[in-house]
Image: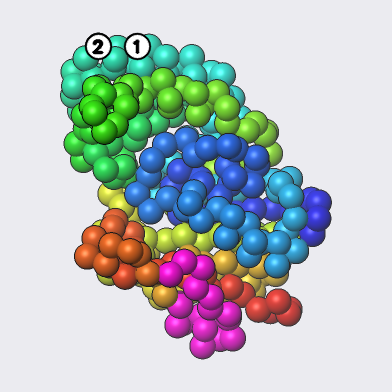
Amino acid sequence: MTTGWTLVEPCCGSGALTLHMLGARSSLVPYQGTKWSLRQNLDAQLVRLGAWGAPSRVVLSDASWWACVVATVLRDREAVARALLPMVVRGESDANALYADLQSALVPADPIERAAVLLWLQRMSYSGKAVGDADDRWIVHGISKTSAYGIEATERFGAVPPLGRALLKAVNRAPQTQHVECHRGLAPVVVTGPTVVYLDPPYAGTQGYPSGGLTREQVAEYAMAWFGEGAHVVVSEAGPVEQLVSHGWRAERIRGPSRDQGRQTFRRATHGEEWVTVSPMGEP
């Protein structure tokens, strides 16, 4: 599977694994539960499955607009950056007013404008909480004053500038491909060649996402459907997905307990472990 393979990311969120596999040097935005810090671990899992190098085709899906926003950036980062620039400039002078206008606005119908707005809202989101949508309006969770306005230097730390420009830089450095498709909701189970599915659902027992979630039974059924069609499948969770392990899937811990045992994160259980449950190497 050294060339000509497809990467499918259901529940893609900000598309961390896809961006990494396509050669990105940074994630686009902070995002709750992002797997950017685990990208090398996940890349190694894909190599074990035979998926070397960049995928020749990417399929992204998510319950919210995230899949299509990431796909829009991958197809035309320059257009997204042009639409984003006026928001960055305005945000540097009055981020609160811009945030108030955008959080009450309808989701733009134009894909370029929609990508720019969602990316700016996410970059400014308090603690990186996921921005979603319902009834054609954004769902937001508050603004990060540090991201919006920066902080002055102290005796212990240097100054932090407003982070809108950092977002522009991330967009302008994003990889480009026309071989990407996106879906709202779960991607249809269609395997037309060597395929790896990376499924990163909302973790059981943790705060979910504003646009929807999946039960462990639904995750297992969806993963088994892809495997049944001939795809390799990797599922992330805070522990083994027992419904899949019972069918002979391999579970492996890829990150140990967090140093801060008492901190509750958005998508991980409080112990902070990260596991993958991986489909068998043989034929389904």
Side (left or right) of 254 relative to 156: right
Q: Give the range drawn in magenta.
A: 240-256
On residue 225, which mark appears?
A: none
- Using a 10 Å C-alpha cutoff, classify the residue at mark 2 as few (fewer than 14 neighbours), some (14 to 19) or many (20 or more): few
Query: Are the two marked residues, 2 and 1, in contact with CB atoms closer than 8 angstroms?
Result: yes
On residue 93, which mark appears?
A: 2
Q: What element carries label 1?
A: helix
Q: Which amino acid does label 1 sit on?
A: Val
Q: What residue type is labelled 2?
A: Ser
Q: Which residue is drawn at 35% across and 25% down?
A: 163
Total numbered badges shown on the rendered structure: 2
- Residue 266 in the image: state x and y as whole percent: 29, 56
Residue 71, located in which quarter of the rendered image? top right
- Using a 10 Å C-alpha cutoff, classify the residue at mark 1 as few (fewer than 14 neighbours), some (14 to 19) or many (20 or more): few
Height in image: 73 above or below 223?
above
Label 1 sits on residue: 89
Side (left or right) of 87 relative to 227: left
